[in-house]
Image (cartoon, rainbow, N blue to C red):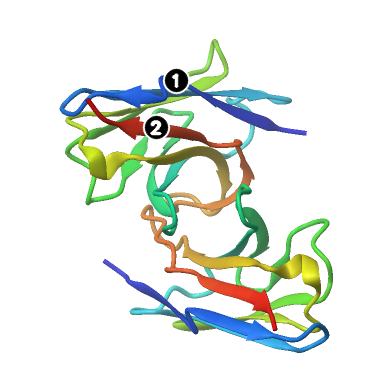
Amino acid sequence: DIQMTQSPSSLSASVGDRVTITCRASQGISNYLAWYQQKPGKVPKLLIYAASTLQSGVPSRFSGSGSGTDFTLTISSLQPEDVATYYCQKYNSALGTFGPGTKVDIK
Amino acid sequence: QVQLQESGPGLVKPSQTLSLTCTVSGGSISSGSYYWSWIRQPAGKGLEWIGRIYTSGSTNYNPSLKSRVTISVDTSKNQFSLKLSSVTAADTAVYYCARAEGPYDSSGYLDYWGQGTLVTVSS
């Protein structure tokens, strides 16, 4: 089975900072990669699919890139409402594995 | 706007079967090429993909749970269901149902989620 890892596991940044989260697959998954945001006590929300396609209604400060095994989620200018845990998920096969998550908070 | 709502017992005894239903509103569960999925999250931990069903009845499960999981669909009620047998305390989690989109034979990405329901396994 393909394993998903994320780094860092947590980060603290200032408002306005550029934040980058990395997701790595143990084998190539083309661009079948989604990113989710889960705010404390809330339901996960789809941010990005197909590695770089922004879901409707998601602010443009979020962007995704990558293909194969290495992917990134970037927040161009961190806002207080972006405090959340971010998960990647592969969907190249019938098994939809999530990464372990990256917790983002404000410094 | 598609909406999903989980329902079922919040407390299940060890060794028994956990049963949850997800009711879909705002669209027919049979329309479009969607996968209807279950995900769970133990308190303070990450997301675990459980499995999904296509409206044809085709299913795929997480190998770690495969021997205990059954997902079924009732198109007449616009619902799909999860059964997890022989539960233990390790199965205590918030259980989410969700709609997935994606290529044929993939798990899909999850674009609509239910609010989640906490299931506690305890005697």
Marks 2,1: beta carbons within 8 A = yes
**Residue beneath disc 1:** B8
Quick one: label 2 or label 1, which is nearer the N terminus? 1
Q: Is residue A47 above or below residue B112?
A: below
Q: Label 1 amino acid?
A: Gly
The residue at the point 61 percent across, 36 percent down is B115
Q: Label 2 amino acid?
A: Val
Q: Are marks 2 and 1 on the same chain?
A: yes
Q: Nearer the viewer, residue B71 or A20?
A: A20
Q: Whole-percent x and y of residue B34?
A: 56, 39
Q: Whole-percent x and y of residue B48?
A: 39, 53
Numbered mark located on residue B119 in the image? 2
Residue A48 can be seen in this image: yes
Residue B36 can be seen in this image: no
Q: Nearer the viewer, residue A4 or A77?
A: A77
The residue at the point 33 percent across, 43 percent down is B60
